[in-house]
Image (tube, grey):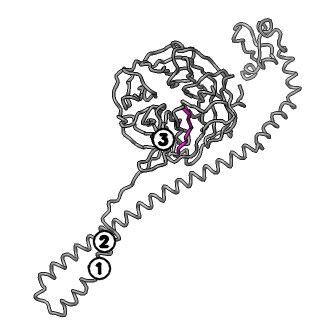
Amino acid sequence: MATTELQSAVPMCKHHTKEELDSYCFTCKFRICEECCRGEHKDHNWRRSKKAAREIRENSHARCEKIEGMISGLEQNEEDRETEDDIERIDKLKMEFISFIDDLAEEMKAKRRVGKSQRNLTKELEKLRKMLNFYKNEVKLVKDNVILEVEEELHILQENISSLSIQLGKKKLKFREGKLSPDVLQYIFGDVVDDKSESKVKVIEKSHFTHVDDSTFIKSIVPVTCNEALVCRLSSTQIDHVDMTGRVIKERKLPTACEDFTMMDNDIIYTRFGDKIIRRLSSSGKASDVISTAPLHPCGISTSRDGGILVTLCDCYPTDITTSSKGDILQITSTGGITQRYGHTEGHTDKVLMNPRRVAQNVNMDLCVVDVIDKELKTRLVVLSIKGHRKFSFIGQPSLKEKFSSDDVVCDHRGRILVTDFYNHAVHLLSEDGHFLELILTEQSPLWRPRCMGLHGDTLWVGCSKGVVRVYEYKEEDDKE
């Protein structure tokens, strides 16, 4: 009786609480009440519950067959089979990795056994030492032939000891840990991505504004979220936290103007070109030195994928470049410890970098560097491996009218490289191995003299001349709205 009552009970409308849901709207695909029928659903395709149920029953067989066909299609989908193959490959890599760790442990145990052999040798030598003491003390008492026999044995023993000493040595056994990080491990093993790494992207402007005034250009821009960013103008001693409309949320005062800056744990890390120093501005407003870069000048700065800091170093302003100019990329910790140096090796005539201005680390750990190569501010994009070897250079598109002169570079989550082009009013999109894909922004976008960029998720911020900041939606061209 209770079950029958439950099945026959008519629920009440949540919008019109005194009305029963006695009809069904085929347009909206849910039940409605009498008030709903007379109101917002009056022009929809609706039926009273009894008639609607009859129609649904009549069409139920065809509807079920359609859904079953969809299920079968999903089960037979070739991409799903490829995914299963990929899962098997990942499982294989997992087992190989575990096997490598096991082999490493066995190697350690084997070397430990050598260490035990060395300790056993030490014990044997102690016994022999006692025998030698006995021999020295009793040498006058034993017969000549015994002395000669012992002398022969001692000579053989001496040669054996020398051989064992060379083989075993007296090395301290320890495990030397490698520099394993999630990003490095992901790069070695691979990544799980949609197969769109070289697909086109769609860039749609969301907003634009003039920051402060049009007297100068935007020097640096660092997104905090998709909707907010830190912005700094040329020669300004202030970094402003703004939203997409240009409204200033917070001001961060610097003791002196910076060349470039990045964020780390809510602190601002910035470069002082003329002073040859990198400084930190804490969230409380206190400024302190991180590291001196003398004799070179620090210019561009960004965070690395292992939580460190990357800085470009050069020996002069771009307008003072000579054939002997050289530059470096310095990787440091948040406290100023140097972990790596790229770009120039003392004693080598082949300079990898001349006047590097900006640097960004890609998801595959490559270093993407904007490098100025002459006094006319002609630039190239140089991409270095994690070991510092040059992988490729990009010098712009030959079809464009003006020379390639870039001020900034960023990378997206698929490893594609975005690089500004000042005189051609454009942003180039490259694949991670250097293939030109497209111009994602041009003068017709409109874009005028881009100076700096910041990418956060699917939002691209571009700082331009005359104080203009443009904010774009950055997404795959075939993504659904």
Please determine whether, in this image, residue 178 is positioned above or below residue 468: below
Q: Which SS class for mark 1?
A: helix
Please determine whether, in this image, residue 450 is positioned above or below residue 32: below
State the residue position of label 2: 165
In the image shown, does 338 or 343 lie closer to the viewer? Answer: 343
What amino acid type should be assigned to the residue bearing mark 1? Glu
Q: Residue at x 60, y 16 (%)?
A: 208
What amino acid type should be assigned to the residue bearing mark 3? Thr
Q: CA distance from mark 1 to mark 3?
A: 62 Å
Q: Which SS class for mark 3?
A: loop
Position in image of residue 210 (x %, y %): 56, 14
What amino acid type should be assigned to the residue bearing mark 2? Ser
Position in image of residue 348 (x %, y %): 45, 50
State the residue position of label 3: 323
State the residue position of label 1: 159
Q: Earlier in the sequence, mark 2 or mark 1?
A: 1
In the image shown, does 360 or 401 lie closer to the viewer? Answer: 401
Is 380 situated left or right of 178 in this image?
right
Q: Residue at x 49, y 41 (%)?
A: 353
Please determine whether, in this image, residue 440 is positioned above or below residue 173: above
Q: Is residue 382 magenta?
A: yes
Q: CA distance from mark 2 to mark 1?
A: 10 Å
Is 16 situated left or right of 358 in this image?
right
